[in-house]
Amino acid sequence: MLVLLLPLVVAIFVCERAGWLYPPETVAYDSLYVHTFILTSDAKPTAKCERFEAQTYGGKVYLYVRRDSARTLPQQGDTLIAATRIRRADSIGDFDYRRYLLRQGIVGTAYVRDYSLQLSAFSHQPSLQKRLYSRLAAAGLSGDELATTGALTLGYKEDLDKELKRRFQASGAAHVLAVSGLHTGIIYALLLGLLTLGGRRKPLYENRLGRCTLSLIIIAVMWFYAWLTGMTPSVVRAVLMVTIFEVGRMYYRQAISLNTIAAAAVLILLVRPLDLWSVSFQLSFTATAAIVLMANEMGKIVHYDHLKRLQGGKILNWVVGVLIVSIAAQLGTLPLTMHYFGQISNYFLLTNLIVLPLASILVPCGLITIALGGTSLGLIAGKITYGLAWLMNHSVAWLEALPGSTTQVSIGTTMVAIYYAMWLAFILFYANICTRQKKAVTLPSK
């Protein structure tokens, strides 16, 4: 798969620059016409408008609807008819905003004041994600704690305010709010524990039927979770890797390798080639590749497995393991973080030591709270979940408030390419040295 990935990336890049991946320009840009818009997303408030993603005959657009307290706010699924102009996005300085939108499948923007509305029969029925989110509120969660729990468990981010997002980003914990490998790993571990009764039954190794049945159940549940959380590139990558891993387990193969990561990337890009420019896609795959490439070798250098034999050594072993994985992921995503966000977190190691254990407990507690809802047990679970979310939010706020929590630094695309070229060259050089050392100590067979 690694052999296929590079030509595919090059082909997608060439086709994108040529404009072949974008929808044909059938929209009459900048001309006043009566358009029919089918709203495909919920409203996102801006300064004076509500912004929707809407489908029209020429493609998907950002539709800005003027806020009016006297009118019913449209909802996802409604059909809105209005006379307006669909405009190409303008460049903002050196930033090609039009190309940025096209990479997300958005062909233009439109603004409407007066419109007629056709309500969909399903538009005022909340989605499954919203219904599950409301169960968290019914269990007693509210405010930032409700928003954080919803983001971690369901990928629902509509209630996350800008200040809360800024704190998570500045402290180096933004990856926790985006459903990705961490969250799917927690869900996967819970599933495996439930289906094997805490490891007491291991049908994966008893017989082929039990092994395949268990794997198929896990794959189905994981894809349902990916659909529930919005099928973002990070969660699709993680679930694809779980799928490939489980298919491998059917044939007694149990290893996450670069080929597994490359296979997930190839499958995603074949279906959604423009995801190549998604920040989530890039951060997700570079972090995972860095962990696979470097974490194991860094562990060998540190040689920390012997810590398990000491009193309290399991906790110390876990701490060192988290630090190694965090450093590997940070090294993999560092240039992208500087390029896209213009800052890096200086306390990312401390952040992960605090946030990861909390997230590992908060996600299952949140799921239990969702399952119990507003029942008596649900209210008890809700208080526990609220406390964990409160602790996470305040920990992030404390980390963000530490002196020198962030360093403002920004680099261009050329520097990003140079960094990854040097990174890859070092890894190949190190692998070559390790191979030579293994050959040098290998005795000839008799």
Image (cartoon, rainbow, N blue to C red):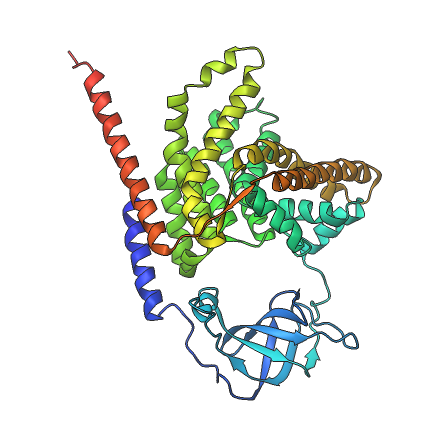
Where does the image place residue 417, in percent across and percent down from the top left?
A: 33, 50
Q: Is residue 306 visible?
A: yes
Describe residue 230's horizontal placement relative to residue 258 as left or right: right
Describe residue 18's horizontal placement relative to residue 359 as left or right: left
Assign the C terminus to one quadrant of the image.
Answer: top left
Where does the image place residue 73, in percent across and percent down from the top left?
A: 73, 72
Q: Is residue 173 visible?
A: no
Q: Is residue 74 above or below residue 377?
A: below
Please tell me in which quadrant of the rendered image residue 38 appears. bottom right
* Residue under the point 43% across and 49% down: 336
- Outermost residue toward the right in this view: 376
Q: Nearer the viewer, residue 364 or 301?
A: 301
How many numbered marks have been drawn onto this rendered protein structure? 0
* Residue under the point 24% across and 27% down: 433
* Residue under the point 31% across and 48% down: 418
Please tell me in which quadrant of the rendered image residue 47 appears. bottom right
Describe residue 231's horizontal placement relative to residue 374 as left or right: left
Assign the N terminus to one quadrant of the image.
Answer: top left
- Outermost residue toward the bottom in this view: 32
Q: Is residue 29 above or below residue 197?
A: below
Q: Nearer the viewer, residue 234 or 148?
A: 148
Where does the image place residue 71, in percent across and percent down from the top left?
A: 77, 77
Q: Is residue 47 above or below residue 364?
A: below
Where does the image place residue 260, in percent across and percent down from the top left?
A: 38, 41
* Residue under the point 58% across and 28% down: 196
